[in-house]
Image (cartoon, rainbow, N blue to C red):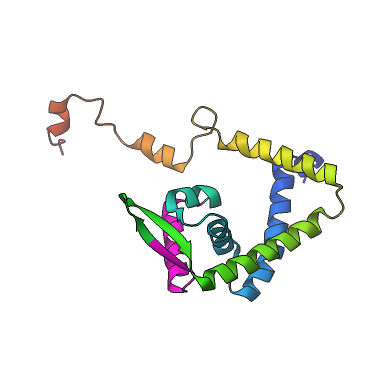
Amino acid sequence: MTEAIMHSVGFLMNRILSALNDDIDQDLVRLGANSRSARVLVSVLHQSPLRCRILAHLVGLEATALSHLLRSLSRQGLITRSRVENDNRAVEVSLTAKGRRLATACEAVRRAREDALLKDLGSDEQKQLLSALSKLQQQIARPRRESRSPGPRDAARLRRPSTARRPAAQRAAPSPK
């Protein structure tokens, strides 16, 4: 591996995050959790009830993946889901007492690992790191339509023939076989 790659921001962030998540996951498994469920539980701990749409954004999961995870957490008795009173389409998530205890324990694990990671950085260095990471997060959170490379969903969409550009008579007519 070249020196340039090993010192690139993306590579270093990936390595740090992977190592941190591996360490945290070892402790979370003992609690009966994993990093994905812990992110959800801790997010709801800090802001409850929390709408699923906002929760998905906070924890970086697609709606479908979050739905499956919430179903599992609900079966374990860690969360409750309820429809929002004025918007029947929206669902809010809250922690049960059991979920609150687990979320608090998960937060303590995360905080301890983070403190261990940052122990050799001074207060000013920690503030600078947090500031730089926040700026990167804001940059990533900006709309990516103009700047991102096409992904698998884009390729599938581009391969499909568009019916919107053809006149209505052509769209309604069956295709010749």
Q: Is residue 51 left or right of residue 147?
A: left
The answer, for residue 121, to whether it is visible in the render is yes
**What is the x, y in percent for residue 41?**
55, 62
- On the rendered image, what quadrant is the C terminus found in? top left
**What is the x, y in percent for residue 5?**
75, 41
Front residue of this view, candidates 50 and 6: 50
- In the image, the segment drawn in magenta is 61-81
Residue lying at the far front in this picture: please name it: 85
Give the image quarter of residue 81: bottom left
Is-magenta flag for residue 80?
yes
The answer to whether 123 is drawn above or below residue 148 in the figure is below
Which residue is painted at 75% across and 63% down in the image?
112
Which residue is painted at 62% across and 74% down in the image?
31
Which residue is painted at 29% across and 33% down in the image?
161
Which residue is painted at 46% across and 42% down in the image?
152
Dominant SS in magenta: helix
Is-magenta flag for residue 152?
no
Front residue of this view, candidates 2 and 63: 63
The answer to whether 4 is drawn above or below residue 47 in the figure is above
Please give the count of numbered marks on the rendered protein: 0
**What is the x, y in percent for residue 144?**
52, 32
Q: Is residue 152 left or right of residue 26?
A: left
Q: Is residue 21 left or right of residue 95?
A: right
**What is the x, y in percent for residue 61?**
50, 52
Front residue of this view, candidates 14 and 35: 35
Give the image quarter of residue 20: bottom right
